[in-house]
Amino acid sequence: MTSKPLSSHAGTTTTAGRRRRVPMAALVCAVLGVVVPSATVPAVAAPAARPAAAADTTGDRLPGLDPQALQHALSSAPDRVTGVLARVSGPAGHWTGTYGTADIETGAPVPVDGRFRLGSVTKIFIATVLLQLAAEDRVDLDQPVQRYLPDVLPGNYPPIPVRTLLNFTSGLPELTPDDLPTTPEGIVEHRFDNHPFSELVAKAVQHERPFTEPGRTQVYGATGYYVAAMLVENLTGHTYQQEITTRILQPLHLRDTTAPRTGTTIPGPHSHGYIAVPRPDGGPRLVDITEQNPGAGGMISTTADLDRFLTALFRGRLLPPAEQAELFDVPDVPYLGGTADDPGQGRAYYAAGLMRVTLPNSVTVWGKTGTTFGYTDGMFATRDLRRRLVYSFNPTTGGGNDLTLVTRILSAAFAP
C-alpha cells in the first residue's frame, strides 16, 4: 500500500453559551510547549509559570468555546496523521469535529461515532477496578504487592505498596526497545503476537530500577499497571477485562466500549490505523495495522462512551469517597527527570491513574492519554465537569503520543 494525499473531510457541530473568535496568530501563540523525558512519557501541556493548586471549580477562568481554534487544531498535522476526531461536552459548551479520512483507500470521512483503541487510557479503568476492590476490603493499598503476588517480583525487591502501582511511584523498571519490536517493520511483523502480563513483567524486572525507595519519587510507566492488572485477576479469579466489563461497562451502559482479550478487530464504525514503513527506495508506504492483538491496553471505545465514563467517575458513581479521593491525590514527591517546564514543575503530577495539568489561564484539568500502534487518544475534564474533552487520532509514526498535536487540541479546548 502506498501513501497518498489525504482528502480533508472536516465536520463540525457546535453549541456554546458564549463564543469568541481568536485570530490565527493568537491561536498559534497559545499553543503550549511540552517536554519529552523519554518515549514512555505521555503527552501533556506545559503548566502556568507559577505553581497552581488543583481547583474544584473553574469559575470565570474557563474561556468561551472557540470552534475555529478547535477545528484548526484538529487539522494542524496532515503530514503525520490520517484522521482526527474530537468531542467537547459539558455545561460550558458542546462541539464535535473530525479531520482527514477513515480509510486512505476509499477516502471515507472519519466517523463521528467511530471506535478507537485506547492504549494507556485503559490504566484508569484498571485503577478504578482496583480501588473498588480496596473499598470491598479485598486489597489493602498500604500492603506490599508481594503479599498478594508472592512470585511475581524478584526476591531482593523491597516491599512495593499497592498504592504505588497506581500513582507511578513504585520504582518498577520498564521494558526497553530490546524487549519488544519497535521498528516499523518489526511492529508490522509482530502485531499479532501475544504477550501475557507475566511475560512483560518478567522482562521488565530484569532491568535496573529507576529509583530504589517506593513512594518517594514518581515517573510514568506501564509495568506498575501490568502488575495491577495481574493483582485484579488474582484477587477476583477473573480476567481484568471481565472485571472492567461487569463493574464499569455494563453498569454505565457503555455499549460501544469493549475490553477484548484476544479479538484483533475493531467492531462497528472506526478509522483505520496505519504505520509508515520505509520502502527500499527510501520513501514511506502506509501499512494498515488496524487489526492487531489487543494485548495490554487493548480496550476499544468512542468519544461519547469515554465522556460518560469520565463524568460518572468524577461524580463518584463508581467509587466511595475514600477511594474517590485517591483519583485526585497527587503525591508530594519529585518527578524523576522533571523540570520547571513540565506539568508538575519538577514535582509529581499523577494521582491514581489521572494526571493533573494546569494551563496558562489557570484552568486545571484532569485526565489520561493513551497510545497504541495506529491510535492515540485522550480524555480531560475540569474537576467540576463544566468542560470535558475526548479525542482520538491516527498517527502514522507507529504509536507514541504526538505531543504537538495533543497540546494543540488540549489548548484549543481549554485555553484558546
Image (tube, rainbow, N blue to C red):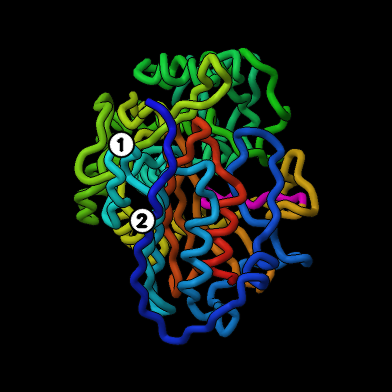
3 versus 342 height, above or below: above
Q: Amino acid at mark 2?
A: His
User: Residue 390 or 136: which is nearer the viewer?
Assistant: 390
Left or right of 266? Residue 136 is: right
Check the image and report above or below for 411 versus 402: below
**Front residue of 273 and 329:** 273
Give the image quarter of residue 364.
Answer: bottom right
**Whole-percent x, y for residue 87 in the image:** 38, 62
Is-magenta flag for residue 22?
Answer: no
Q: CA distance from mark 2 to mark 1?
A: 14 Å
The local secondary structure at tag 1 comes to: loop
Closest to the observer, 394 or 295 = 394
Q: Which residues are magenta?
A: 346-354
**Is 27 left or right of 381, judged from the image as shown?**
right
Residue under numbered circle 1: 105
Mark yes or no: residue 238 visible.
no
Using the image, tell me which numbered label, if any, was put on residue 378. none
Q: Write down the residue under mark 2.
A: 9
Image quadrant in which the C terminus is located: bottom right
| Among the 4 quarters of the image, the one containing residue 207 | top right
Residue 395 image point, x, y percent:
48, 40
On the image, the x and y values in percent for residue 304 come to 30, 59
Amino acid found under the numbered disc labelled 1: Glu
